[in-house]
Image: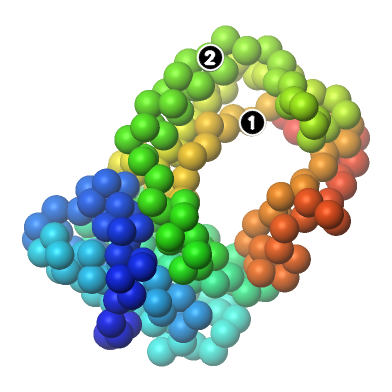
Amino acid sequence: MNFGPASPDLLPGAKNAVETCLSIQPGEKVALVADEPSRAVAASLSAAIDTVHAKCTSLLLEDFAPRPIKSAPAPVLDALETADVGILCMNPQPGELSARMAIVKVVERRQIRYAHMVGVTPEIMQQGMRADYRMVDRLSDKLRERMLRAETLTVKPKPAQSSPPTSNRGLDWVKTSGLISPRYWSNLPAGEVFTTPATVDGTFVCDATAGDHFNGKYGDLQRTPLTLEIKAPAFAT
């Protein structure tokens, strides 16, 4: 599969993903899975993979089934079974979560380096994918060390919830800073430190993006925030 010529505007972000985030080495096998709307992004990633002399198997989802895809195509799973590195680059559609979960299941079982680039657009490649991820990793380490000692988290100046969550110190804080290892696959772009809270009671307000296919459907929620009333603990100790 050939995704076509790479746009020069997307190559710096693709180079960052391939060389810095995934640390792809010469001779490694890479499974690059994409869909038709993500062709431009996939083309830039394919070009960056070729630059480091890795072996790329490129797969277009629409070649195997109509969208939305209800289950992961066998050729995609087969490619991941023999790959050292996997990349999923696609625009999500409603009803496709189970297919993506099947892909991630193979990744986690085999413990390969994997970039989950769902919903990544050319604009994101020119912005978030050009971040200095080594610096993001250093900042993530500092934040994680601090959060391991924290008991509550308060968001300022605009709180995202009416009652702050309490921390469960029995659980670890995990970072996905963009430097991907076999232990943790990651979304790209990246830059998160997260855990499961002990309790969350109150009002949660999502005023950025809701994730998955809701990004494309609703976009930025700053003017029309999504409000969730949470009445039970998220995690009981």
Q: Is residue 102 visible?
A: no
Front residue of 109 and 12: 12
Q: Is residue 219 above or below residue 108?
A: below
Q: Is residue 193 visible?
A: yes
Q: Residues within 10 Å of mark 2 (few under 14, many from 20)?
A: few
Name the side, left or right, on which 214 lies relative to 158.
left
Distance between mark 1 and mark 2 Cα atoms: 16 Å
Residue type indicated by callout 2 = Arg
Give the quadrant of residue 107: bottom left
Please state which of the two labelled residues, at mark 1 or mark 2, is closer to the viewer: 2
Residue depicted at 83% across the width and 54% down the height: 223
Residue depicted at 60% across the width and 81% down the height: 68
Q: Earlier in the sequence, mark 1 or mark 2?
A: 2
Q: Is residue 227 above or below residue 166?
A: below
Q: Residue 237's x, y, as percent?
A: 71, 20
Residue type indicated by callout 1 = Thr
Name the side, left or right, on which 28 lies relative to 79.
left
Front residue of 197 and 158: 158
Give the quadrant of residue 229: top right
Name the residue that disc number 1 marks.
196
Q: Secondary structure at mark 2?
A: helix
Q: Is residue 109 above or below residue 47?
A: above
Considering every residue shown, the one lying at the far front of the view is 9
How is the model colour-coded? Answer: rainbow
Residue depicted at 68% across the width and 12% down the height: 151
Q: Secondary structure at mark 1?
A: loop
Q: Residue 172's x, y, as percent?
A: 52, 23
Name the residue that disc number 2 marks.
146
Give the quadrant of residue 200: top right
